[in-house]
Amino acid sequence: MTLIDDNETAPAPLREKIRANAEGYAVSPAPGEDAPHLAAAWNPTGVPASPATIDADLWPGVAQPPSGAKAAIAGKAAGFLFKGAVKRLPLRVEYPDGSVLGTGGPDVPVMVMVRPEAFEARIGDNGLIGLGESFMAGDWEANDLAGVLEVFAASVGTLIPTPLQKLQTLYLPRTPRQERNAEQNTRSNISRHYDLSNDLFSNFLDSTMSYSSALFPPGAGPLGSVGWEALAEAQRAKIDRLLDKAGVGEGTRLLEIGTGWGELALRAAVRGATVYSVTLSSEQQALAQERIAAAGYADRVTVALQDYRAVEGEYDAVVSVEMIEAVGYEYWPNYFQTIDRVLAPGGKVAIQAITMPHGRMLATRDAYTWVHKYIFPGGFLPSVRAIESVTQQHTTLRVRERMGLGDHYAATLRLWEERFLERSHEVAELGFDAVFQRMWLFYLCYSRAGFQSGYLDVQQVVLDRREVQL
């Protein structure tokens, strides 16, 4: 894909930055206009512009902004709140009429409003879900999408005035019952993400096909600029640390909850372990089995299409990498009770978990977000305190040690994002349209912003059964 590479030096205001139909990108007309409008041709990220007409069957929440009197009123109110918030934030928000909001200087991220009224209608109707949907629709652009989202993430608790925050629960959407992670729903929730296409994931993951935070060694260089060539080895380092902490070696009976595409199971088998790995993704199961057989370890590794709650047997070690996020708040006791039930005496557990601050976790546990709607239905991030509390109240397991590596996840996500954009043509050839690509970019940048701002962290947590001294 050809990138528009002169935007950093293009003068303000917005109309001078945007070139209609530049470099062959589609330009979406504004509602009510016949000619191309200031639009997504200003696109330093290289993501395709949303098409002028979006398929409403594929993207019902994106094709058209909310309309009608109620939407107009909500949009006006949302626009007033948004403008009031961004006036004090370190970024630039540029409008088609040349007006600019924000406190930032020349180096801050820039958010370009293409269709302000549509943007306001969407956030008025759906809050932060509308923020993501408006980007998918091309209602706004950014020269540094992760940077813009990082500013919002760092200020998430103050974007809406405190008295109004309590009112959000009255009108914002709630989690659909069919997306709760009960056993009858979990398979469909997982498949909506992981069964998209193995080829899609292979276009932006490294050769290990690891879809979780890497652990970069000091020799890889500064995390802010670490290169793609370091990623595969950093993924192996992450896996090896977890296996070491769980004591996995020759003869270990290992349970893996959440197979991914098989790299951890493979590395455990190389150590001489016997691995039973469970997944709910048929696509992941197929590729993991293929990779394991090709490496010659099919006799040591079983990959089962099975809910973690149905696992039987006894295991010397349990490892689970970024799977607890898909369990759901109300099912965390089941998750840890299952581990407790199958763990042999003297066994150890090592999990890698994306976490959020405990206060924010409590405040958002009933929220239905853009990530739920478009990326991970049924998911929810724990806090470290929640992991400790759940294990203390419902199991004999106790947290032995933990290590945070949030900065490593920010670096991992940056590399995925860059790779995804480099492979945009290949992704399109798989049948994923421009709206999907904008959605996926928003997801990667949204996640990176969380780690860069400190709103999110990722922890490697080691648990075992401590003997209580009386």
Image (cartoon, rainbow, N blue to C red):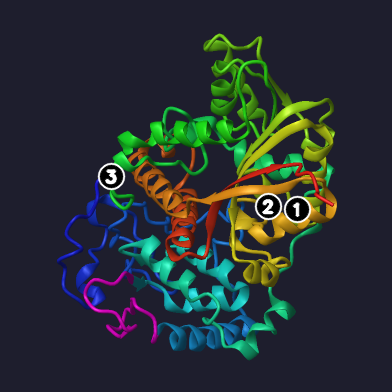
What is the chief secondary structure element of the magenta stretch? Answer: loop
Mark 2 or mark 3, which is nearer the start of the sequence?
Answer: 3
Residue drawn at x 33%, y 66% as measured from the top left: 39
Please provide percent x and percent y for residue 67: 59, 76
**Which amino acid, by three-letter code, is at mark 3?**
Gly
- Name the residue tied to disc 3: 221
Tell me which segment is drawn in magenta: 87-110
Label 3 CA crowd tier, 10 Å (few <14, some 14–19, many 20+): few
Which amino acid type is shown beneath numbered disc 1? Glu
**Residue 365 vertical position relative to residue 404 in the rendered view, above or below:** below
Q: Which residue is mark 2?
A: 377
Camera sees residue 362: yes
Tag in front: 3 or 2:
3
Q: Is residue 200 visible?
A: no
- Name which residue lies at 65% across and 25% down: 285
**Residue hosting label 1:** 179
Query: Mark 2 touching mark 1, by CB under 8 A?
Result: yes
Q: Is residue 457 magenta?
A: no
> In x, y percent, where is residue 413?
43, 48
Q: CA distance from mark 3 to mark 2?
A: 36 Å
Based on the displayed image, in which of its 4 quarters is residue 142 positioned? bottom left
Describe the element under mark 1 as helix, strand or loop: helix
Q: Could you say which quadrant of the image residue 278 lies in?
A: top right
